[in-house]
Image (cartoon, rainbow, N blue to C red):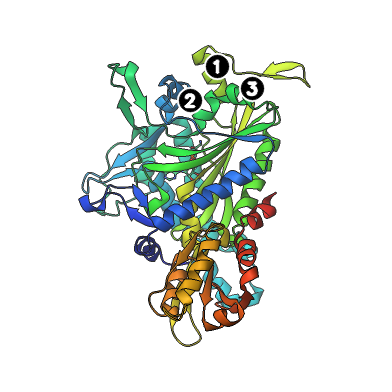
Amino acid sequence: MADFQKVIAHAKEYGFVFPSSEIYGTLGATYDYGPYGSELRNNLKQYWWRSMVQMHENIVGLDAAIFMHPKTWKASGHVDAFNDPLIDNKDSKKRYRADVLVEEHIAKIEAKINKDIAKAQKRFGDDFDEAQFRATNPNVTRRQAQIEDIEARLKQVQVDEDLVAFKQLIEDLEIVDPVSGTKNWTDVRQFNLMFNTQLGNIAGEEGKLYLRPETAQGIFVNFLNVQQSARQKIPFGIAQIGKAFRNEIVARQFIFRMREFEQMEMQFFVRPGEEMKWYEYWKETRLKWHKALGLGESNYRFHDHLKLAHYANAAADIEFNFPFGFKELEGIHSRTDFDLGEHQKLSGKKLQYFDPELNDSYVPYVVETSIGLDRLFLAVFSASLQEEALEDGSSRVVLALPPAVAPIKVAILPLVRKDGLPEKAREIFDELKLHQNCYYEEKDSIGKRYRRMDAIGTPYCITIDHQTLEDGTVTIRERDSMQQERVSLETVVNTVNERVDMNSLLRQVK
Ligand code: GAP
């Protein structure tokens, strides 16, 4: 995997991701997707949408408005409880999330353990037994005990919402500000993450509108509309893709943590008491979906939540090995009947389902899968970016994206700009563009053109040469192996279509 700074630079240079409003000095934690970035994003959305909605008879789609009635956010708990604990360093004037400071401290201890393990592995070679080493090495067991103690204290202060104890934890761990190097901290305070704005025609609190911090609530308030109009029976799901907004205190790590981002969420409505079965089902199903992308199975792991959100009775993250380590990519949450129950109370409207098999009505329980599209983009992009040494001593940068999600599927390249080759190449381009997103290029040497296509992740290049005019064949060059094969013009469209088809991904997850 490429170095993180290289990932960011490559994304900008090749038209994937630009910092927002760059000519004005950029806006923190906000990014724009360029020509290839927007294509990659759309393809990732399609992979998610098709695997959820097209592949499941009992999952249907929704596209709810970003603005919702302000009572929505009171009922959901976001007005009262969607807070992050923040702390300022008085010397650097920098603001941090208190929980992130503690988690980073834990990560440093973990890094020391991993260093000890790597050293021992080197020393003992094939005889090394990691489990035994972890259980018996005094340094490792002492550090592991430290981690467990800190995690327990962190959980306790979060559950108790005890901000004084939170500050004490930071002081006890002797955490220093990475900027000023001092321990001169303010008290820990709660900070609500929702952006708000005001309706033009209603003054005061009544007219206060929030930019949704999650897409899920649009699904909950439409639960009965969707269930009845789409004639769904429990268990069934509602899927939605849309923008969400959070006033993040710590906004860094490129598109990993943004203030405006896109979520792909699915709420699965189930019988009360059956939620844990479905929670386990969706954990496994979502992990399989990620692994089908072929970015490396060891790059994924589950992380069970220590602190449950106000609506959940179980929650886990699927973490991905980003260039800065394992971090949350997707959340799977068992949300109980909290949201529907609270909306029912505050709106005074029944949000119940009549179950014909049980001959009874109930508020369904919900299992949610929630993934940030931008984080998925970063996972796919960073894991695909590789610098490769070639046999002739040169090197190339290749973005080895899964072909089905690549922005451009095939480039059509006449070998030279004369002898009727561009005209023949245009004919092929005009046919292939009916099927796939194609790219036509006749400038520069063929080697340079191949390199440019490698850098934007184009899985196939079709080259039209003089032989094409004689026998109606072209070469297809495959990005990863750089192998070339000759195929006839009659078969070229089908050959490309088969190799870049999204069905190859969907078949693995059906
Ligand atoms: N509806 C549940 C929910 O919103 P969450 O864990 O807060 O749960 C779900 O968010 C996913 O949204 C995360 O796993 C992450 O992929 C993405 N996400 C959350 N905050 C984000 C941010 N500031 N920038 C980019 N993606 C974010």
Q: Secondary structure at mark 2?
A: loop
Q: Do the residues under discs 1 and 3 have CB atoms within 8 angstroms?
A: no
Q: Amino acid at mark 3?
A: Gln
Ranked by sequence position, the earlier of labels 3 and 2 is: 2
Ranked by sequence position, the earlier of labels 1 and 3 is: 3
231 w.r.t. 460: above or below? above
Q: Residues within 10 Å of mark 3 (few under 14, many from 20)?
A: few
- Name which quarter of the figure residue 197 lies in: top left
Residue depth check, mark 3 versus mark 2: number of the one nearer the observer: 3
Q: Secondary structure at mark 1?
A: helix
Q: Amino acid at mark 1?
A: Gln
* Number of marks present in the image shown: 3
415 w.r.t. 454: above or below? below
> What percent of the width, then of the height, locates residue 63?
51, 33
Mark drawn on residue 344: 1
Q: Amino acid at mark 2?
A: Ser
> What percent of the width, then of the height, locates residue 359?
77, 16
Q: Residue furthest bottom?
A: 392
Instruction: Identify which residue, 3 or 42, lies in the foreground.
Output: 42
Q: Secondary structure at mark 3?
A: helix
Q: Residue at 43% across / 52% down in the picture?
A: 38
Mark drawn on residue 228: 3
Q: Residue furthest top?
A: 348
Instruction: Identify which residue, 311 or 286, lies in the foreground.
Output: 286
Q: Do the residues under discs 1 and 2 have CB atoms within 8 angstroms?
A: no
- Find disc 2 in the rendering and name its residue: 76
